[in-house]
Structures are given as C-alpha cells and as structure tokens.
Image (tube, grey):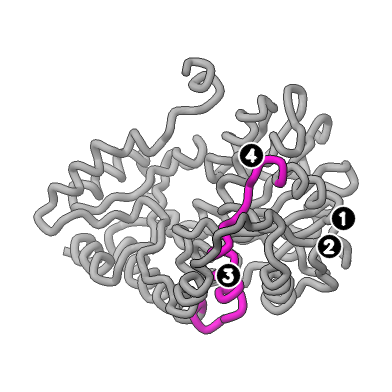
C-alpha cells in the first residue's frame, strides 16, 4: 500500500468532506455543484437501444462492432468536420478517464520520459504519468516547452476546469510544433459540443492538421453530451499508427466496452436532437448561475465552454468553498486542478433545475 501512496497524490475530493457536511446541514438541503456528473435522464432512444441489446451472452470486441465504428466516423465528419475518416482511425474506450490514467503505460512510457499537460488541468493527466513512473510537466504554452524526452503532450479544449477554448490558430500552431519535435499529441475534447461563447474546434479539423492525422489523437466522451456517464462510453480518433498498437494492447488487457453499451452509443451518435435539448438545459442553468455569482461579487474567468463556471472572489479558494458551504452550496476548490487555481472555484452546471434555483436564491438573498 505504501508503494501505491508514494506513486499517487492524495485523492483530492476527500478534503472536501467537511464542507460537504456543512452544506448538507443547510435547512434547504445541499446544492452540490462540485462534481460534473449528469443528473438528467438518459434519452429514451438510447435506453431503448441498450435494452434491445441486453441479450448479449458473448464477449464483445475491443474494436467495437462495425455499426459502432460507422457511427463514430459519421459523427466525426458531421460534427467536427473531419475528413476521410475510416475504421482504422477510431477506437472505442471504456470511458475517457481510464484512457487518460493508463495511456502513458499503454504507450510504453516510463522513467526518463516526459508527459506534459496544462497548468490548470484535470488531475488524471498527472496520475497517468505517475502510474507509468514517467516524469511530468505542467505548461501555460506547450510550444515553449523543452521537447527533450517529451513523449506525450496533452491538450484539453474546452478545458476542465476553466472552460477555456483553444482557437483554431492556437491549435494549428501547437500541432505544427508537436510534429516538428516528434511529440505525440492527445487532445481531450470531451466538452467539444458544449460551447457557449466560443465554437470549439477539434484537432481533427483539416484547417488545424493540414488534412493529415499524423501524430495526433482526439479523445471524446458521451458522458456529458448524452448523459451517459454511467455507461462508460467514449472513443479515440486520429492517427492509425497510434491507435493500431493501442488496440492490440487493449485486446490483451480485455479493455472492452459492453455490447449493450456499444449499441447505445450507436443510437446516441446517430441523433443530434437530444444533444440540442440537453444543451438548452445547461445553457439555462448556466445563465442563472452566472448572473447569481456575479451579483454575489464573483468574477467569472474564461468559462466560454464546458459545464463549469471558473469563478473567483480574489481570495483563497478554500475561503470561498467555506463561504458557499455555509449557504448550502458545495463547489470544487480550484487548487484541485493545480496550484494556479488557488484563488478560483469550479462551479458545475450539473444540478437539477430545482437545485440550481435553490442556489440562485441563496446567492441573491
């Protein structure tokens, strides 16, 4: 156990427990805006597809059914503007978190290799490097990194936690730099369909990559766009020279998405209506929470996309967490995502309409 604890950081959410108890003691109950987990129903057409595929006694394939690969490639072309995407360009995964955590290990990285990720970032990028015993570095601008021994570069656009979106010009510059230095680029784009004040662009877009997928892979999830966090449904898209070996490794490891889930993903990716409906729910909640936070003396930075508001009162994030917990509202402290977040909190939009209204009332009283 000590060897594990030496390799991994303290699980950050444990630190939030005392504040969660404070918020839960509020007479009106807790409004939990700390975790970005969906609360709205899984769309009926997706549930039906899952149920219809429930009689699946045999093992599923790691690469997924041809219907699943067709659905993924069709979505990539329709929604992201990707061109000439074949089945060799895609790979289903068991939710995006397991991929982020185990990718350095599956790529064969280890001591002496470097993994880079944004200075404000989802903690699992660092965890993945640690599990592989690789070195890691956080950046503000990846193109000023020393490329020596840099084997894996993570982008995250739209960002978790900040909601910041990298522009097409920025992505083009970063892709060119990574290729120049022989650095493999993985772009975490799980919030790509949730732009509010910006229109997120994928590294798969030909204007960014010049019509070539060489050295680039994007990561996509159905957790947020289709409320499928409980299904563990995600996929990779990009360079076949990278995905082919990953497929072989994942075959050996038995890392396969269940057959009913694969059928559900086909239904989810083939329908845009439910995505638009869910976007409208989040947009309405975002407007209410943003206005209430501003009225309460907060400043909102970035937050032009994703499911979070990156908010600050120009004080310690833990003072802000305590301030809001006393009002029955739980948020995530910004330093969960790196020391650069020490004066911000992340406010999730993933609460029911009733709970969002309760938060707004408490912030505006």
* Residue picked out by circle 2: 209
Q: Looking at the image, tell me whether mark 4 or mark 2 is earlier in sequence order.
A: 4
* Front tag of 2 and 1: 1
Quadrant in the rendering for residue 299? bottom left
Residue visible at 88% across and 42% down? 181
Dot 2 or dot 1, earlier in sequence: 2
Res 230 quadrant in image? bottom left
Label 3, secondary structure: give it: helix
Q: Quadrant of the C terminus?
A: bottom left
**Which dot, 3 or 4, sits closer to the camera?**
3
Q: In what element is the residue under mark 2?
A: helix
Q: Give the Cα distance between marks 1 and 4.
A: 22 Å
Mark 4 residue element: helix
Q: CA distance from mark 1 to mark 3?
A: 30 Å
Q: Which residue is mark 1?
A: 214
Q: Earlier in the sequence, mark 1 or mark 4?
A: 4
Relative to 189, does residue 136 appear above or below in the rendering? Answer: above
Mark 3 crowd level (few <14, some 14–19, many ≥20, 10 Å Cα): many
**Which comes sooner in the sequence, label 2 or label 3?**
2
> In the picture shown, does residue 41 fall above or below 174?
below
Q: Residue at x 52, y 27 (%)?
A: 8
The residue tagged 4 is: 102
Residue stretch rendered in magenta on the structure: 251-275
Q: Is residue 218 left or right of residue 323?
A: right
Rendered image: mark on residue 263: 3
Q: Crowdedness of circle 2 by 10 Å Cα count: few (<14), some, many (20+)?
A: many
- Where residue 157 appears, as percent x and y from the top left, is 62, 58
């Amino acid at each position: 156990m000590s060897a594990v604890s030496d390799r991994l950081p303290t699980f950050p959410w444990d630190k939030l427990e005392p504040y969660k108890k404070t918020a839960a003691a509020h007479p009106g109950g807790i409004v939990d805006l700390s975790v970005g987990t969906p609360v709205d129903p899984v769309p009926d057409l997706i549930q039906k597809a899952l149920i219809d595929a429930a009689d699946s006694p045999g093992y599923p394939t790691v690469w997924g059914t041809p219907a699943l690969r067709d659905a993924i490639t069709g979505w990539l072309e329709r929604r992201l503007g990707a061109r000439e995407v074949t089945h060799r360009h895609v790979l289903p995964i068991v939710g995006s978190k397991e991929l982020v955590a185990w990718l350095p290990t599956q790529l064969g990285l280890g001591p002496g290799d470097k993994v880079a990720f944004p200075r404000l970032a989802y903690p699992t990028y660092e965890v993945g490097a640690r599990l592989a015993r690789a070195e890691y570095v956080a950046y503000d601008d990846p193109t000023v990194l020393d490329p020596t021994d840099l084997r894996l570069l993570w982008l995250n656009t739209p960002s978790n936690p900040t909601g910041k979106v990298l522009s097409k010009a920025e992505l083009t510059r970063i892709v060119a730099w990574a290729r120049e230095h022989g650095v493999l680029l993985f772009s975490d784009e799980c919030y790509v369909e949730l732009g509010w004040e910006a229109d997120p662009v994928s590294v798969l877009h030909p204007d960014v990559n010049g019509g070539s997928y060489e050295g680039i892979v994007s990561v996509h999830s159905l957790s947020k766009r289709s409320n499928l966090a409980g299904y563990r449904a995600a996929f990779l898209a990009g360079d076949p020279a990278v995905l082919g070996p990953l497929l072989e490794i994942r075959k050996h490891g038995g890392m396969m998405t269940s057959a009913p889930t694969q059928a559900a993903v086909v239904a989810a990716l083939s329908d845009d209506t439910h995505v638009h409906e869910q976007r409208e729910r989040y947009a309405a909640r975002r407007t209410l929470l943003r206005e209430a936070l501003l009225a309460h003396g907060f400043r909102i930075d970035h937050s032009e996309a994703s499911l979070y508001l990156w908010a600050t009162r120009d004080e310690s994030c833990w003072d802000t967490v305590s301030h809001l917990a006393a009002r029955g509202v739980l948020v995530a402290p910004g330093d969960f995502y790196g020391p650069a977040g020490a004066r911000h909190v992340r406010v999730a939009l993933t609460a029911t309409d009733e709970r969002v209204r309760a938060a707004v009332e408490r912030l505006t009283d």
